[in-house]
Image (spheres, helix red, strand yellow):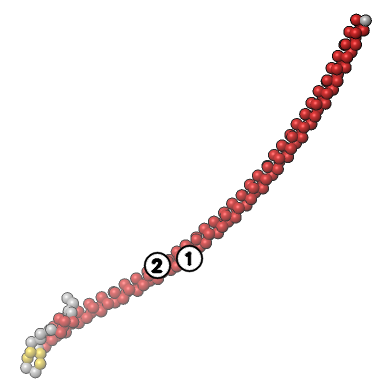
Amino acid sequence: MSLTPVEIRHLDLPRRPFGYGRAAVDQALEAVRRSFEDAWRERADLRDEVERLEGEVGRYKELDVLLRNSLVSAEKAADDLRAQAGKEADVIVEEARLRAREITAEAEAERERIRTEIRRLKSLEHEVRASYRAFLLTALDRVEGETEDRAA
């Protein structure tokens, strides 16, 4: 049984001539001693518990620092990856634009080649028609000439 400071203060020891009764004082001192021992043990237990909890707090603080460092590293890595992806996207877009220009230039060259071929074929058509017309006129003249020769 633990005694509180208020209970110790209000201990009522029986009086005797020349002081207090020895048995009552011894009994009160024994109760105070036990109470003090209990408080001392409890204090030691609490001190041990405080040390244990301070150790845990220290470990949690270390873990907190590690987690914060990990988070900062992860954020930096994410930023680096984002920047790298942006650079790669820019390169891909630039390559696509270059390829588009090449395809457009090739298409323009092909269109010009086809136009040139069409002009050549039209010119050839005119030459063929002119040659065919000349051939037909020559043939017609011969036929007419032969017809006139037979008629005469």
Viewer-closest of 14 and 54: 54
Query: Going 9% across and 88% down the picture, which residue do you hit?
Result: 21
Distance from the alpha carbon under mark 1 to that under mark 2 = 14 Å
Q: Looking at the figure, which quarter contains the C terminus?
A: top right
Viewer-closest of 135 and 54: 135
Which secondary structure, mark 2?
helix
The percent position of residue 102, horizontal first and vertical second, equals 69, 44
The percent position of residue 147, horizontal first and vertical second, equals 89, 8
Q: Is residue 16 left or right of residue 74?
A: left
Amino acid type, residue under disc 1 in the picture: Asn
Work out whether 53 lies above or below 142: below
Which secondary structure, mark 1?
helix
Quadrant in the rendering for residue 146:
top right
Label of residue 69 in the image: 1
Query: Going 90% across and 5% down the picture, which residue do you hit?
Result: 151
Label of residue 60 in the image: 2
Q: How many marks?
A: 2
The percent position of residue 32, horizontal first and vertical second, equals 18, 82
Viewer-closest of 60 and 115: 115
Q: Is residue 138 left or right of residue 15?
A: right
Work out whether 40 lies above or below 114: below
For label 2, the crowd category at 10 Å Cα-Cα, with few meaning under 14, some 14 to 19 and many 20 or more, is: few
